[in-house]
Amino acid sequence: MTFTRKQRENDVRSTNISSVIAFATLCAGCGAVDQVADPEAASGARQEALSNKDFDVDFSDCSEFAGIGFVPASSALAYVPAGYTLAVNSNDALVVVRVARCAGAIVDGKPVGPTITSQVGITLQGPDDSADINNYTVFYATNQARLHARFQAAGVTADNSNDLELSLDAGALVAQSASPHSAGYQVSGTASVPSSPATTFAASWWANGVHGVVQSRTGFPQIRFGVASTTLVTTPGSPLASLLGGSALTFPVLDSYNTFSSAHLEVRRGDWAATLTPADSVGRAARHRVNAGPASRPRLYCLTLQLPRSYRGGS
């Protein structure tokens, strides 16, 4: 059965989803190498540390905007490599837009101060079944030079920009991202500080970097979900407009302003995608689980959608 985008938006609104969120940022680093008597062993240990692209980051005292909306499936496929399964039907895929602001962050064991990140991604089915949501990273930017450098060291494209913003002032919400090589956009509207009970959440973001597949998995021990009403605008003809199929986007699936006191990110390389081919995804029903759990958590939102048979992946 095929749905138009308008029908899908109406169906989603009827489910009265209060909020769901996906969040991930990327950082990388190597631990200190213990001193050893053997110079050869010391050199080998240093080389091993330098070649290790796995890393962690801790965020503290954070707020975020997160929105999920519909984009043309044909546009989304152009940004997602073969081997991943999109949560789509024949017409629409899901795009995730997120801007987070944290009072503090510890990147590779070193405090870096206030940190802002911007992410745009396409929602996937899996590959991390233990996460509440999976997304493929399309654009990423941060104001922190060290975070940016670690991201780049992992082999994943990122941008370093001071023109990132997230603010909530008297109910007016503004989230924006502008950088030379990443997605430029502004989200504006209304929101309120969430008062819902805190809950746990986990999100995995994926990217095919120059060193292989990279998974960025963030765990939120206590996150509060809130409601927003916003619209995104971007420059006509920009790469983001190409993905969206236009210069504006609303978020009927999720439109939220959320807060959390801490989050722990783990970034790991793997080669699971090397075992997959586009044929693994063609014609398979894609069940997208955004969240599941007790009533205090964001409600379960499932899409049983058919992937286009013309699936070829992207470049």
Image (cartoon, rainbow, N blue to C red):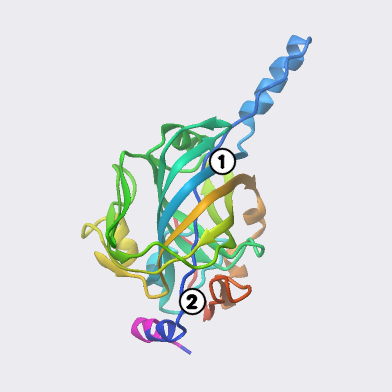
Residue under numbered circle 2: 308
Could you say which is closer to the camera, residue 308 or residue 104? 104
Q: Position of residue 117 (x, y in %)?
A: 41, 47
Mark 2 residue element: loop
Q: Residue at x 34, y 47 (%)?
A: 182
Q: Position of residue 298 (x, y in %)?
A: 53, 72
Q: Position of residue 65 (x, y in %)?
A: 39, 59
In the picture, residue 164 is in which quadrant? Answer: top left
Could you say which is closer to the camera, residue 208 or residue 59? 59
Residue 236 visible to an observer of this rendering? yes
Q: Is residue 45 left or right of residue 279?
A: right
Compared to 56, does 64 lie above or below?
below
Secondary structure, magenta segment, majority class: helix
In the picture, residue 300 is in which quadrant? Answer: bottom right
In the picture, residue 257 is in which quadrant? Answer: bottom left
Mark 1 residue element: strand
Highlighted magenta segment, given as a residue range: 2-9
Q: Nearer the viewer, mark 2 or mark 1?
A: 1
Residue under numbered circle 1: 57
